Amino acid sequence: LGLPRIAVVDNEPTFLRLAQNILTDAGYEVFILNGGASAYEVIKRVEPQLLIMDTWLEAREEGWDLLHLMRLSPETASIPIVVLSSDDPKLVKERFAAESGADVTLLFKPFYSDQLLSAISRALEQNYA
């Protein structure tokens, strides 16, 4: 079956390096995508078992646009998503409740690596049990 594939979309190089290290050490195959503009096409091609993404990529709306696109497309609608955000928690939760599907997990930056790994485990278990 191979290692579970996880795509990570963020525009912060330091976070991408950290995520790659945490996820690789945990035994995942990791695809790092810097920003959201081309991420959707790569996600369709790579077919990850999980997507980790920020709500704020190159522009404030870029992450929300990607999340919306992921949920609208039959090719990507079933991929579980862990959203990591450093935006205002109240605003993110309100918008998140209105726009996301049930298979989207929300974490706020900063977070501990074990929190991220737990969220990933739960999302993968729910979708691939």
Image (cartoon, helix red, strand yellow):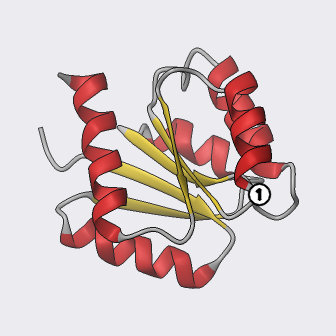
In the structure shown, which secondary structural element does the residue marked by tag 1 occupy?
loop
97 vs 12, nearest the viewer: 97
Q: Residue at x 40, y 41 (%)?
A: 50
Q: Residue at x 75, y 60 (%)?
A: 87
In the rendered image, the residue lying farthest to the front is 90
> Which corner quadrant of the image does residue 80 belong to?
top left
In percent of width and height, residue 102 lies at: 51, 21
69 relative position to 116: left or right? right
Q: Quadrant of the N terminus?
A: top left
Amino acid carrying mark 1 in the image: Asp
Residue 99 position, x and y percent, is 73, 25
Q: How many numbered circles does the render carry? A: 1
Q: Residue at x 80, y 39 (%)?
A: 65
Q: Residue 67 in the image: state x and y as whole percent.
A: 68, 36
Q: Outermost residue toward the left? A: 1
Lateral position of residue 17 relative to residue 64, left or right: left
Position of the C terminus, as image quadrant, is top left
